[in-house]
Image (tube, helix red, strand yellow):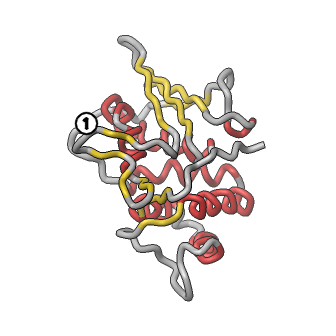
Amino acid sequence: MEQQFAIDPGVEVSGASVGAMLDAFAQYPSIVSKYLQQFGLVSGNKTQIDRANWYPLDKWLAVHSAIAKDVGLNSLYTVGKKVPEHVDLPPHVTDIRSLFGSLNVAYHITHRKDGKLMFDPATGIMTEGIGNVTCEFANNEQKLTLRFENPYPCEFDRGLIHGFATRFEVSARVLHDNAAPCRKKGASSCTYIVSW
């Protein structure tokens, strides 16, 4: 049973974020094109999205679900691992701790609600409606815990974490905390432990 995380109406995801996943999913271009058209993210003969545009989050999540059913849940993990290869990181992100410490801000910046970014860098105000990513660092250990409370599939997030972690720490390991709740079992969040 996959949790249907309640997202607020009017939430959109950035075309740049969608594009990074599509780049990572290049091994299945016909499947992706089919679902982009089926769920109305592109029209006519178009097979590419506009990376400067914004897309309804509910339709983008429907693409994730359809891909999981068509290709399998493992495909979402594999694609999630490849997404970080197609993402430019800001200059302040220089190591694994700064990366995961700023992940919630990055998550909110790639979404908007009613036409406004869900994080305002000028004021530091974060708009609710898509959940959060929290990060807890272990004292003096090469370890951190991430809690993803969002509408994206568990496997996709686990792959995404792994891909980002290994950008800075090649030996990084990502484990799903099986003692914690899981979205695949109806919970609203999943917890992951990253060590290196």
- Please tell me which residue is depicted at 60% across the width and 57% down the height of the picture: 61
Q: Amino acid at mark 1?
A: Thr
- Please tell me which residue is depicted at 67% across the width and 38% down the height of the picture: 183
Quarter of the picture holding the C terminus: top left
So how many labels did they put on this image? Answer: 1
Q: As displayed, is residue 151 above or below residue 171?
A: below
Place of residue 12 in the rendered image (x, y in percent of width and height, measured from the top left) = 48, 59
Place of residue 146 in the rendered image (x, y in percent of width and height, measured from the top left) = 49, 29
- Please tell me which residue is depicted at 36% across the width and 56% down the height of the picture: 116
Place of residue 106 in the rendered image (x, y in percent of width and height, measured from the top left) = 37, 45
Disc 1 residue crowd, few under 14, some 14–19, many 20+, Cα 10 Å: few
Q: Nearer the viewer, residue 102 or 33?
A: 102
Left or right of 121? Residue 146 is right
Q: As displayed, is residue 196 above or below residue 128?
A: above
Q: Nearer the viewer, residue 13 or 173?
A: 13
Name the residue carrying label 1.
94
Place of residue 141 in the rendered image (x, y in percent of width and height, measured from the top left) = 40, 14
